[in-house]
Amino acid sequence: MSYIEIKDLKKIYQMGDIEIKALNGISTSIKKGELVIVVGASGAGKTTLLNLIGGMDSATSGSLFIDDVDITKYNDRKLTKYRREDVGFVFQFYNLIPNITALENVEMACEVALEPFDSQTVLSDVGLADRFDNFPSQLSGGQQQRVSIARAIAKNPKLLLCDEPTGALDYEAGKAILKLLQDMVENYNMTIIVITHNTAIEAIGDHIIKMKNGVIYEEYYNDNPADISEVEW
Amino acid sequence: MSKTIFKILIRKIFNAKAQFLSLIAISAVGVAMYVGILSVPTSMQSNAQVYLENQNTSDLDLNKVTGFTKKDLKKIKKKHKNIELEKSITLEATTSYKDQEIITRLHSNQEINKPYLIKGKEITKVNDCLVDNENEHLYGKDIKIKALDQTKKCHVVGVIYSPSYLSIKTKGYSSLSTGQVKLILYTHPDKAYSFVEDIPFIEPYNTLSIVYPDKQNKQIFSEDYRLEINKKEKEIKNLFDKDEITIISRDDNQSIDGFYNDSSKIREIGAIFPVIFFLVAAMVGSSTMSRMIEDERMQLGVLSATGYSKAAITSIYIIYALLAVVIGCALGILIGFSIIPTAVIIAYHVLYQLPPPIIFFDFDISLQAIIIAIVMIVGSTLLVALHQIKDNCATLLRPKAPLAGKKIFLEKIRFIWTRLSFINKVSTRNVFRYKKRLFMTILAIMGCSGLLMTGLGIRTSVAPIVDKQFDEIYQYDMIAYNTNLNETEVNKELKKLSKIKNLDSLIATNRQNAIAYQDKDEYDLVVLMANDADKLNDYIKFDQEFTDNDIVITQKLAADFNLKAGSKFKVEIDDKEYTFKISGITTQYVGNFLYINKDVYQEHFNKVKYNSFLIKHHGSTSEITKQLEKQSYFTMIDDDTIYQDTIGDSINGINQLVYIMIAFAGILVIIVMYSLTSINLIERRRELATLKVLGFYNREVSNYVLKENISLTIIGLFIGLIFGKYLHIYIISMVEVTDISFIMEQPPINYFLTFGITLLFSLTVNLVMQRKIKKIDMVDSLKSVE
């Protein structure tokens, strides 16, 4: 049984007389525990898809079932509850709260979650055991992204959404982050959706969705996904 | 200015509308306060001036009991060639309407001292008459006027203010009857003449009103005017026997003098308010502009890299701020001149009868306000712009590093810190992180609550005085004055008067006016001698019972002369100095008194005499007055309620001023909180969007920002309460007079009200902000750092 079921999902922005079809009828299904890679050039509609799955935006038409419930029917408050309890989010630019420490950034997410993991453990798991009391401005980009991932995971979400998680990082740091994500799927058995324009990353995913002009033009599964260390770009 | 710079400037005004408007608003409020308060004295005086000129008010009024002869008139005209002169009749009379009898002063002026009509029409027929506005109930009625043993009928066709009685509450005492004049009546000259035409040995016209049309100084409130008219007064006085006439110049007119003093005081009292407003305006202006310039570092960098000069780039912001300030000044000048003096004048209407206020514009004050506003707001913009642009363009092109998080002291107390929720942690850190915002918010809230506290305080300082003095302290209902009586005479009187129906009891007293000197101030006081110390306690409430050997003074004297029980107190009575050894002090609010009993009095003055009675009665005051007059001769019978009404009315005026203060306090808080919170929201858009993505409910996100506001509001409030307490004391001490003891203590309700109202203003802003926060788009969180 699939965890996420998307049927003919459309998102159309009306800009004056012009209609912009950001998502022009998307259908797919995602199983629990999959590492999904959504690949496409900018403007392909992948971020819009992520926003809809993450409950940050509402669809124009179609349906989006999470655990058999259609979240396109949700009101504002229910969507917030959904984001709060079911979704973890990793941003391209980390989006840490600048005025609290690394540990407090993780604790902040735990505060609103139902059954959070221990924040110190998770922050240690991402390799920042000695950085608890540092403020974001005292950390490198890669370290900040680790805090961001720890913050997302510590909530113990069912679904982890990552928007270009390596986009702002250099090669080595980017690789390390992807490694971390891959490990997390195994350790915590989460469903992870990663958005990227980097086609090389396809190799590490279980399920690859390729997008162009608001539609899926190719979709396939990797039975034996590669380890990130084997991937070069 | 280059085309590009100009384009950027125009776009900026339209794009940064909110900031532009808030700059306009804050400079408008500052300027309005400044010009408004500082122009009150001139505006009040100009209003009075215009009114008095329009009514052709006399420079001098001459009264002669036996009337002016043709020879008198000739003498005056010969001495002062170019004068406008009107002869008229002034009569002390009684007006009766139904069974009501009103002590009246009748005038027959038409050309000089023209009454100002507020209702009805002018006198056209012989039987027409006009009444002052305190007696509006007579309007349209037929009344009977009794004077010089004749009674004549009149029909009231209009209601007026009289320029001769600027302060109409003090119509003075009637020389005819015992008591105060309650009605000012204007009749047709022929009607007035009909009262006096048949009286032998006197000339009909007993009043001459003189206007000097060619006088050098037309400003009645000026010193030059006073000197010029005083000279004319002396010249006229020399034409007559000294005792023959009385001359009244505007100098002798107490209501004009009082008006001048009252209007001048406002400026002293109010000066502090524009200072607060301008200070806050400067801070809001500078933080708005520095936020804007920081936001546009990139643009500064690009312009700078493209080769625009620093001066050209800076000019964008300077002109932007200057435009807003100039518009704000224009609005502020409009609002300030029209609202504040008008409101004050209306508040003073209960004391001074003037036509609806006219707005007077004062160029000097406007110019000062504009200069201050420009220096403070545009000046601070210039400083911020110069500070930013001094970085080279490469630095400018890089985003400025965000202010690093910092540990604060509270974190050292681990067991508290770890228990704080994440929102509380962030709020606490932020409060200390943005010190400028902290300072501004606190100052604005402090200003607001200080203003409120002062306004409410002024009300509670003044309002209860009347009730306390006249209901709680004075237990008697009436004072009747007669001429000096000795011990036997007074006992006879007491016996006779105590039989009057409805008169409950009375005691005999002696009242003497005395003066005490303290530095430059003269304190008027009354030395009140009782013939029975024990009984006096039933008529006047003392803090400690008044006994035979006591000499008690009222608290205001004790405080200002620094006197305690056992101190010696020197007073002057009829140019002779007396020294009293004080035995006690008692609380009173209006008037200064020294209470002394008969025997002790005799030790000081040798002879005991009596000149007044304190009376308690029930039933109608006028009935008792009538009975008293029937039984004996009194020079004056004083009924307490008159003072009570007068003071009671002025309290309504004060309330209006308090409402204006509350309104301004509210505007101040709203503008400041709104601007600061807006800036805060702009700065933290991404952070808030992130919180939303992470699943924080709208309420939690609002809390995250607004908690800071609330905690700063509360800190500001506590400081403001203290500030307000002292500001109030300062203002009350500015208006202090020598014979009224204001209540300095503020009752707890003032603290609660101040707290509540300020919080309400602050919460209102927060509510608006909550809606803004709700509208923040989560997609913002995905964008790159700008």
Image: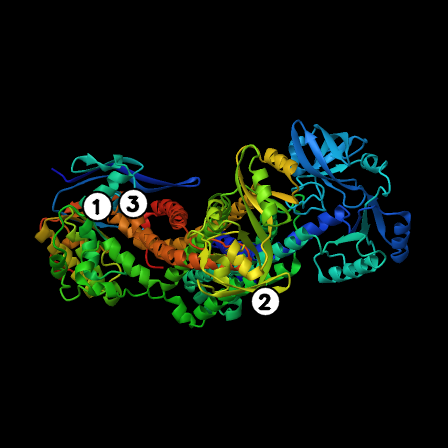
Hey, which quadrant is residue B330 in on the image? bottom right
Measured Cα–Cα span from mark 2 to mark 3 = 63 Å
Q: Chain of mark 2?
A: B
| In the rendered image, residues at marks 2 and 1 fall on the same chain | no
Regarding residue A233, the answer to whether it shows in the image is no
Residue in the image at 60% along x and 33% along y: B623
Dot 1: few (<14), some (14–19), or many (≥20) neighbours within 10 Å? many
Asked if both marks, 2 and 3, belong to the same chain, the answer given is yes
Tell me the residue that label 1 is attached to: A84
Which of discs 2 and 1 lies nearer the camera? The answer is: 2
Residue type (three-letter) at the residue carrying disc 3? Arg
Determine the secondary structure under disc 1.
helix
Residue B91 horizontal/vertical position (percent): 76, 40
Which amino acid lies under the numbered mark 1 shown in the image of this protein? Arg
Q: Chain of mark 3?
A: B
Residue linked to disc 3: B699
2 and 3 marks in contact (CB < 8 Å)? no
Residue at 26% of width from left, 58% of height from top?
A167
Scheme of colours in the image: rainbow
Between B715 and A140, the one nearer to me in the picture:
B715
The quadrant of the rendering that contains the C terminus of chain B is bottom left
Which residue is denoted by mark 2 in the rendering? Answer: B520
Q: Secondary structure at mark 3?
A: helix
For numbered disc 2, what is the local secondary structure?
loop
